[in-house]
Amino acid sequence: MNRKALYPGTFDPVTYGHLDIMERASRIYDCVFIGVAHSKEKKPLFSVKERVSMLKNATRHLKNVEIEDFKGLVINHAKRKKTCVIIRGLRMISDFEFEFQMALTNRKLSEDIETIFMMTNDSYSYLSSKLIKEAVSLGADVKSFVPASVAKKLKIKLSK
């Protein structure tokens, strides 16, 4: 059986919490597609190209992970990738309400696609890309939250 899954997100920037989900998913599925969403609503700090590049660098040790960007509905991207599984990471119970609504909406739009929730490692449960960006803008060293190459890019981007 060729088991494939899609893990979508904006990943602005990728954190160790995201990478924890990716690494664990790569042990469960034969192929994990990481879909970097174009998201004007979230007003990302990094361009799609930069986010894809950071993810490719951070996941180069995961041979069954493919990184690419996508536009539009997640379920449509899942169909293009011929997968019926969407992975969503949960940090805390506060994430669940939004993720649950999204999963139910996706199910209504496409009954053949399932959403699988994965809890991040508890040592990363407090991390958020937004919080990390704010910390860097205030001068914090965030290398314990994101890969060193991402921390460096954050520092450069936010010191302008």
Image (cartoon, helix red, strand yellow):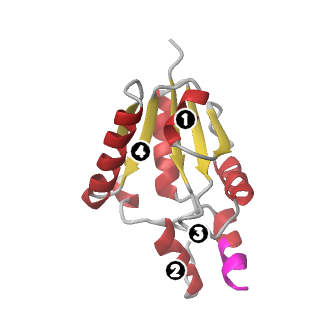
Identify residue for label 1: 76
Give the answer, above or below, for where 19 lies relative to 43: above
**Sooner in the amino-acid sequence: mark 4 or mark 2:** 4
Identify residue for label 4: 88
**Sooner in the amino-acid sequence: mark 3 or mark 1:** 3
Identify residue for label 3: 43
**Sooner in the amino-acid sequence: mark 4 or mark 3:** 3
Residue plotted at (46% across, 26% down)? 84
**Sooner in the amino-acid sequence: mark 3 or mark 2:** 3
The location of residue 17, given as percent across then percent down, is 46, 55
Q: Residue furthest top?
A: 1
Amino acid carrying mark 1 in the image: Asn
Amino acid carrying mark 2 in the image: Glu
Residue plotted at (42% across, 28% down)? 113
Label 4's element?
A: strand
The location of residue 119, given as percent across then percent down, is 34, 47
Give the answer, above or below, for where 99 lies relative to 131: above
